[in-house]
Image (cartoon, helix red, strand yellow):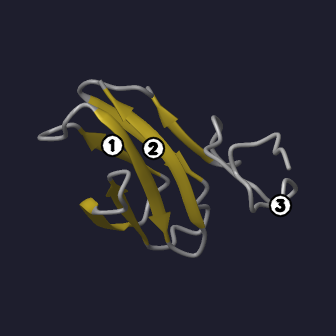
Amino acid sequence: MEFSSPFSNYDEETLTGISETEPAGFNIYPNPFSDRTTITFNNPNFEKHQLFLMDLTGKVIRQIGVITGNQIELHRENLSPGLYMIELRGKNIYRGMVVVE
């Protein structure tokens, strides 16, 4: 038996991966960044959100809360170069990836 994929047990219709675009209403710019980046998101009613920055293992590296506006500036500070996941939790949940140069 021969497989056309390196994965032997998966459903092609439900396989997901990292998207190169953020969800509608969520932007990270510049991305990649070396000093700081700005994260904007839809929050017309100024709901409370918390930002979680995680490494690729899911370990929370930084947590910022309470955010009630529609944008936040993330500073590099002691972040090592690499790829990080961002999760913004509130009434809506936004997820994205950011690259630190």
The secondary element bearing badge 3 is classed as: loop
The residue labelled by disc 3 is 11
Mark earlier in primary sequence (3, 1): 3
In-front residue for pair 91/22: 22
Q: Quadrant of residue 4?
A: top right
The secondary element bearing badge 2 is classed as: strand
Residue 55's place in the image compared with 37, above or below, is below
Badge 2 amino acid: Ile
Q: Quadrant of residue 38?
A: top left
Badge 1 amino acid: Glu
Q: Position of residue 44 (x, y in %)?
A: 61, 61
Q: Residue at x 75, y 62 (%)?
A: 9
Mark linked to residue 73: 1
Cα distance between the residues tagged 3 and 1: 39 Å
Mark earlier in primary sequence (2, 1): 2
Cα distance between the residues tagged 2 and 3: 34 Å
The secondary element bearing badge 1 is classed as: strand
Q: Residue at x 81, y 45 (%)?
A: 3
Q: Position of residue 78 (x, y in %)?
A: 12, 41
The residue labelled by disc 2 is 39
